[in-house]
Image (cartoon, rainbow, N blue to C red):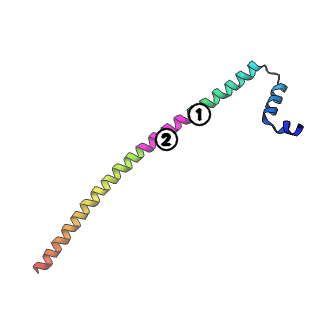
Amino acid sequence: MVLQQVIDPTYVANYSCAMSEQSPKQQFELELKKLEKRITELLRACGQLKEENRSLRHRQDSLINERAGLLQKNEQVRARVESMISRLKAMEIGS
């Protein structure tokens, strides 16, 4: 039974609370401050993630536009090459 109490986290928490000389109100305020700090950290992380997401979306838009431009250029080059091939075939037949 003693071993079980040592392993049980609720027993350890209760034991440590009993050992500390803080009143329940002080303990509550301490936990509240810890929670406030954690929430502040989470809000900061959330802000950083929003900024990173905005940046990645901007980069994605730019890459999509660049890709569209490259596809258009590729299509123009393909059309020119086909035209040149047609003219060469016409010249070959005419000779």
Name of the residue lying farthest toward the bottom: 95
Instruction: Give the quadrant of the C terminus.
Output: bottom left
Residue closer to the observer: 6 or 76: 6
Quadrant occupied by the N terminus: top right
Number of numbered labels in the structure image = 2
Q: Which mark is residue 69?
A: none
Q: Decide: few, some or many residues near mark 1? Use Cα within 10 Å; few <14, some 14-19, many ≥20.
A: few
Q: Tell us which disc is closer to us: 1 or 2.
A: 1
How far apart, in angstroms, are the residues tagged by discs 1 and 2? 15 Å
Mark 2 is surrounded, within 10 Å at the Cα level, by few (under 14), some (14 to 19) or many (20 or more) other residues, namely few
Q: Earlier in the sequence, mark 1 or mark 2?
A: 1
Q: Is residue 85 left or right of residue 14?
A: left
Q: Is residue 74 left or right of residue 39?
A: left
Magenta-colored span = 45-57
Q: Is 85 on the left or on the right of 35, as rendered?
A: left
Residue at image position (56%, 33%) is 44
Q: Which residue bears the numbered disc 1?
A: 42
Residue 66, relative to residue 44: is it above or below? below
Q: Main secondary structure of the magenta part?
A: helix
Q: Position of residue 50 (x, y in %)?
A: 49, 37
- Residue indicated by mark 2: 52
The residue that appears at 30% across and 53% down in the rendered structure is 69
Residue that protrudes farthest toward the front in the picture: 1
- Looking at the image, residue 39 lies above or below residue 4: above
Q: Decide whether residue 77 is among the magenta residues.
A: no
Residue 23 image-quadrant placement:
top right
| Badge 1 element | helix
